[in-house]
Image (spheres, rainbow, N blue to C red):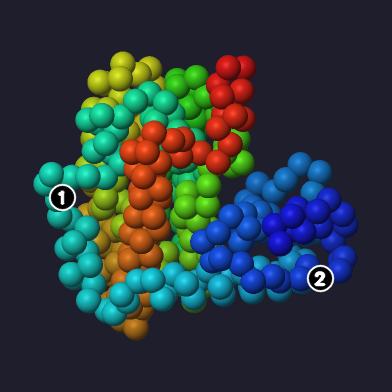
Amino acid sequence: MSEQVVATLNGEPGGRAIEFTDADPYGEDLTIALHTLYELHYGGFDGVHPGWEWDPELLRLRARVEDVFLSRLRSDVDGGDDLDTVLGDLLVEHVPGSGVSHHLRDDGTWDQMCEYFAHRSVYHHKEADPHAWVIPRLRGRAKAALVAVEFDEFGGGRADRMHSRLYADLLEGAGMSSDYLHYLDDVPAPAIAIVNMMSLFGLHRSLRGALVGHFAAAEITTAPSARRMAQALERLGADPRCAEFFTEHIEADAVHEQIMRNDVIGSLLEQEPSLRADVVFGIQATEHLESRLAAHLLSSWESGESSLRTRLRWLVSQNG
């Protein structure tokens, strides 16, 4: 299916419909197909006709693919509307920790760090963009507060301080390519699925509560992990540009966490209490997909294998 999508985009809009084929909701084929369809709403592709963005047949296919992905996400989380408990769980730091940032801080190698950078590049090249879709769907204090967080994500009006730019600097500091989505072919489905979830939530008004929940989960959990990543990079003697991305998030996201919990979620649910379960779903779905990526990374590294799909291409790119 993903091959059909790519082949179709080489032609003119208005062609024949692409046949939907059953696929693993978390598998490579569906994940790449969906990411390719979503990219038409972001930067697009060189040589691809801009009319494909709103082509009815592509939108029909995307709806089928989204339904499979969203249905699986909903079935894999507990759901419910106990927001206080879900938010409280995010605020708890388990000791001792056993996540990816713990491993990289304590035992990770430079190769593993670079693999992690490649995985996260798919997310951070788009940092804050998917969340912007929800702005026109909010009102009053919730909108103003979310825009305040986004303003920081976009560098407070300074292009060189945009978080996506800081991540590009990080990649360059690590001797890696900072080109947009350069490592998309290298990373497996678990990393890409997280970005697909963000686009899914952002592009559908009916999922605005889920997008707010996702954004809150990301902001609440970033500061502690960013601190560990900065410590890992110091241990490994990395270029200062690598650590700067994470040190920026330590302070910024500690503030963002308060804004997201109290001003964005609090105000949103005052206005639309029926969205409580959607906010919970957004948080749970984020934690679920992040856990899947962490499990992939750690299991690969523990077995002495690369976590990337195309290690040969990776080595070639690293060696110029």
Task: Say whether residue 120 is left or right of residue 25.
Answer: left
Q: Residue at x 15, y 50 (%)?
A: 93
* Position of residue 20 measured from the top left corner of the image (x, y, whole percent): 71, 71
Q: What number is the disc on residue 93?
A: 1
Q: Residue at x 38, y 71 (%)?
A: 76
* Position of residue 269 measured from the top left corner of the image (x, y, whole percent): 30, 75
Q: Is residue 162 visible?
A: no
SS of the residue under disc 2: loop
Identify whether 165 is placed above or below 213. above
Q: What number is the disc on residue 17?
A: 2
Which image quadrant: the C terminus? Answer: top right
Identify whether 156 is placed above or below 36. above
Instruction: Bin the neighbour count of mark 2 within 10 Å (Cα to Cα): few under 14, some 14-19, many 20 and up.
Output: some
Task: Say whether residue 121 is left or right of residue 47.
Answer: left
Label 1 or label 2, whichever comes before in sequence order:
2
Identify whether 88 is placed above or below 191. below
Residue situated furthest left in the rendering: 95
Residue situated furthest front in the rendering: 303
Task: Say whether residue 8 is left or right of residue 277.
Answer: right
